[in-house]
Amino acid sequence: MDHVEVLFKEYDTLRTEIISRTNNAVQLGTAFAALGFGILTWSVSRSTIATFQGVVTLAGVILALVVVYVILNQWLVQLDINNAAARLRELELQINQLCGAELLRWETHWGGAVTGPRRKKQPADGPCPRSNKMN
């Protein structure tokens, strides 16, 4: 196995890791929201907090826990994704240098670290190319 193939294996693995982490974050958020609504529904059905004040207090506590969880979860997942993306940029540079051509470009030119969340900044070398098949 030559050096470029080994680097491509790491590149593919990191791409998969980023996709997996993103999916896991969404799934955990969904599960936590469902759990929160389940607890709220169960609590409302209990006679001990069936008053309006009890429901409002419980809803506030659950909402605060959900917000803290989502912020913490997204921050930790984003740290992992940013680390993987930084390594992907390094791999793109290494592979491109070994091959003598700019074969890999996405993370270096159009990745989230370059353009920011939701593509707010201009890509490093112009707009992202789009396939005509998608239109």
Image (spheres, rainbow, N blue to C red):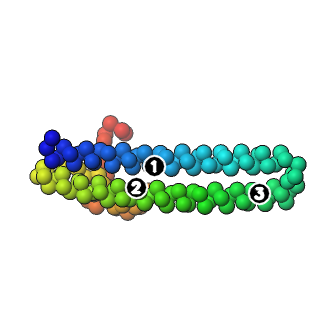
Circle 3 residue: 58
Spatial CA span between label 1 and label 2: 8 Å
- Element under label 2? helix
Q: Quadrant of residue 114?
A: bottom left
Label ID, residue 22: 1
Circle 2 residue: 81
Residue 89 rendering spot, x and y as whole percentages: 27, 57
Spatial CA span between label 1 and label 3: 30 Å
- For label 2, the crowd category at 10 Å Cα-Cα, with few meaning under 14, some 14 to 19 and many 20 or more, is many
Quarter of the image for the C terminus: give it. Answer: top left
Residue 125 rendering spot, x and y as whole percentages: 26, 59
Marks 1 and 3: CB-CB under 8 Å?
no
Residue 98 rendering spot, x and y as whole percentages: 13, 52
Spatial CA span between label 2 and label 3: 34 Å
Residue depicted at x 73% and y 60%: 60
Residue depicted at x 29% and y 57%: 87
Residue depicted at x 85% and y 54%: 49
Q: Name the amino acid type tagged 2.
A: Ile
